[in-house]
Amino acid sequence: MGGVCSRKRSQLVDEGDALQTSPRFSKTSSLKWLLLTLPRSSSDVSGKGQGNEPGRCPSLMELCVARVCQDIDRYSTFAMLPRDLSQQIFNELVNSNRLTEASLQVFRDCALQDIGLGEYPGVKDAWMEVVASQKQSLLSVDISCSEVADSGIDLLRDCSSMQSLACNYCDQISESGLGVLSGLSNLSSLSFKRSNAVTAEGMRAFANLVNLLNLDLEGCLKIHGGLIHLKDLTKLESLNMRYCNYIADSDIKYLTDLTNLKDLQLSCCKITDLGVSYIRGLQKLTHLNLEGCPVTAACLEAISGLSSLVLLNLNRCGIYDDGCENFEGLKRLKVLNLGFNYITDACLVHLKELISLESLNLDSCKIGDDGLSHLKGLVLLQSLELSDTEVGNNGLQHLSGLS
């Protein structure tokens, strides 16, 4: 699965912030403890730690973190350290690929806020005991591409302050394992890409996530019929259901009341013009992706009322010219993808008023030289895709004024 799930953690705090008094420990004693464990000479402290650009002197905090990571096997616990310091040590071990199941134990009960282990090798249920030991301090967890199963995810039930959870490509988590989510009502971001655990029945656990802003279900093939459990998540701003192949019009009607939605991704779903009509009331929608959906230009009647729309992707939808007059209402549109459709120069007549357009994709459309004359007023255009069209030298002359 490689780079699909890659995620870097470099959320470092300034040295001054890192040395502030922890609510649990005094600055003096905890830092003194750390410095006493370091050698008198700093000559063997790696110069390759975080932030050590050529010509820049590393801070004391960076030197401390680098040395602790180098000698991580010497320590049994960091529970007495200030949270921000132990967080930096944890992040550096992950980024340098030096965190092991054994060294993870020193972070038990450290009140860490951010556990970023997406695509990290060897993560399994046993690791989750230490993750869950952070309890109410834990705000963010990424265990994407791990071997964590139901018993491991269940350990998070006492981490009710958590705001972000990513379990992409976690094949070992089942439908029943999702039950723990119902108690994590503070979640604002949840991602379960390509998960067989997310079924129509399993999505019942989402119904209590009333603070959810971002939900990513890309590639979850078993959620047809489950969107009814999202109807009360009225704070939702972003919903990704790309490649959820069996999502149909009957599912989309449950999105009608999600009036705060700004980003809706529906690529390669079974959405038709009827399904699009259900979202005509989502007036805050700025990004709509219908790539590969079996819609026609008739869906533009509903879309034209989405006055906030800045990105519309209709790539590979089988759009013809009839109905394209409804493009004229999308005055704020900046990105329009019409690639691999059956539109001709007659469609481009209705694009000339879209003066906010910055990117237009007409790849493999039946466009010729005359059609480009309708684009010469799109003075903000920065990107124009004309591959495999019938445009020639004469057509390009119409673009000469688009600086």
Image (cartoon, grey):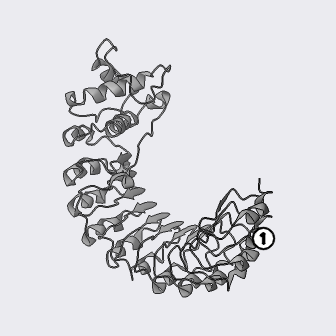
**Could you tell whether 86 is left or right of 321 in the image?**
left
- Residue 192 percent across, percent down from the top left: 37, 64
> Tag 1's secondary structure?
helix
Q: In the rendered image, which quarter contains the N terminus?
A: bottom left
Q: How many marks?
A: 1
- The answer to whether residue 344 is above or below residue 69 is below
Closer to us: 298 or 240 = 298
- Residue 72 seen in this snapshot: yes
Side of 171 where 363 appears, left or right: right
Residue 81 position in % (x across, y down): 33, 32
Q: Position of residue 402 (x, y in %)?
A: 77, 57
Q: Amino acid at mark 1?
A: His
The structure residue drawn at horizontal position 30% and vertical position 65%, both measured from the top left corner, is 180
Q: Is residue 228 above or below residue 385?
A: below
Please name the residue that numbered disc 1 is placed on: 374
Which residue extends farthest front? 393
**Residue at the location (76% across, 65% down)?**
394
Q: Is residue 78 above or below residue 289?
A: above
Q: Is 207 above or below relative to 120?
A: below
Q: Is 277 positioned to the left or the right of 344 in the image?
A: left
Q: Determine the image quadrant of residue 345.
A: bottom right
Q: Quadrant of residue 145?
A: bottom left
Residue 355 visible in the displayed image: no
